[in-house]
Image (cartoon, helix red, strand yellow):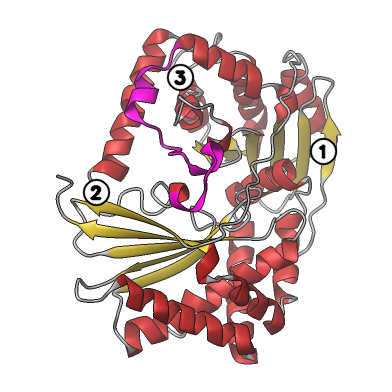
Amino acid sequence: MAVPELHRRTLSNGLRVVLAPDRSAPVVGVSVHYDVGFRSEPQGRTGFAHLFEHLMFQGSESLEKLAHFRHVQSSGGTFNGSTHPDYTDYFEVLPSAALERALFLEADRMRAPKITEENLRNQIDVVKEEIRLNVLNRPYGGFPWILLPPVLYETFPNAHNGYGDFTDLETATVDDCAAFFDTYYAPGNAVLTVAGDLHPEETFALVEKHFGDVPARPVPVRPSFAEPLPSAQRTGHHVDPHAPLPAVAVGYRMPDPVSELDAYLAYSVLSEVLTDGDASRLQQRMVHQDAIVTDIGTGCGLFGVPLDSRDPDTFLVTAIHAPDVSTQLVLDTLDEELDRLSATGPDTEELTRVTARWSASLHREHDRVSSRTLAFGAFELMYGRAELSAELPARIAAITAEDVAAAAKAMRPDSRAVLTVEPGSES
């Protein structure tokens, strides 16, 4: 994958701008990444970053509610936003002729979103319903991204529920929202990315026109969320009234993706070796050969997306198994396969297969202007290098069997968290 031609500037108000021209199709992506996510929420305000993401779609001082939607959709475009552990993103993908419209819309809500009591109460209800639908009333809801962190981690930023507690959500005030906006939604705390069919100088002029007069505000000092590794196995248990079968999630800490990127990527390759496809090790051993689980998966990050947060990050193993299979048997089998990999590493065929498949997946994602725009923005914000998204296939191809073996060896029982899920009534 060729490293893209990138153009950068920083406006006088601190907004960082990244342009990635690609004239192959008359389409453009626009994204804004703010340096605030679940881990920045204050105690007593769980779920606030996600709630605020919803509020950013409720109009502004110059546009009524739903106007943003109408302007994008009438241009033939799509839009969305999402909240992550360390950032919140908003994006549009439109025909390139509508670029200025997208820039106006993002600048407009960066300047002054419409935060009213009515909008706040409405969106609290929307978020609560989302939690009911996605967590409380579905099998394995919140498993493992909500349920595992308080077992693996000790500090509030890393361990709390990013979806939010109903009491915390219901007691949020307009003043809380205003303070959150003033603190984290300053232009100097954001990255604007434009990718696709654009001319850099013309686009910089449009960016300056729409974003240049957004008032500068102080930028918060980003804290470190680092905490010590577990010194013993940690365990947790959850009763799920909707789950048809028992389940287990195992969490391990990963290397810092900023200071130890190649070691981090070795865990990503390890994940592919373990569970990517029917030929993978855990699929072969635990599903087909021994038949002790009905489903097993691994992944980097609480959402299974590598490089989606800063340090500390989590390597996940999740399995669903029959009631007559013990959690200990699942763990022992997992440990046996990790021991084998730590002793010999993957063979050449395995390594070639998984790295080729992953590289192909990255190339496919990079072909989509929405994925490309969001990746550039996230990597620029978190790691200071938007280029990293295009460099990943080569970095992954350079991972050796010894690197993967070292990652497997580091995944020890005495430094992990184990969460078991039991079907049944909570009473």
Q: Secondary structure at mark 3?
A: loop
Q: What are the residue bounds of the magenta stretch?
A: 151-173
Which residue is nearer to you in this view: 255 or 194?
Answer: 255
Disc 3: which residue: 58
Q: Secondary structure at mark 1?
A: helix
Which residue is nearer to you in this view: 125 or 79?
Answer: 125
Disc 2: which residue: 138
Q: Residue at x 34, y 24 (%)?
A: 167
Which kind of residue does numbered mark 1 sit on? Pro
Q: Secondary structure at mark 2?
A: loop
Q: How many marks?
A: 3
**Can you tell which quarter of the image residue 268 is in?**
bottom right
* Residue 200 circle label: 1
Name the N-terminal-most of marks 3 and 2: 3
**What is the x, y in percent for residue 404?**
65, 77
Which kind of residue does numbered mark 3 sit on? Gln
Which kind of residue does numbered mark 2 sit on? Arg
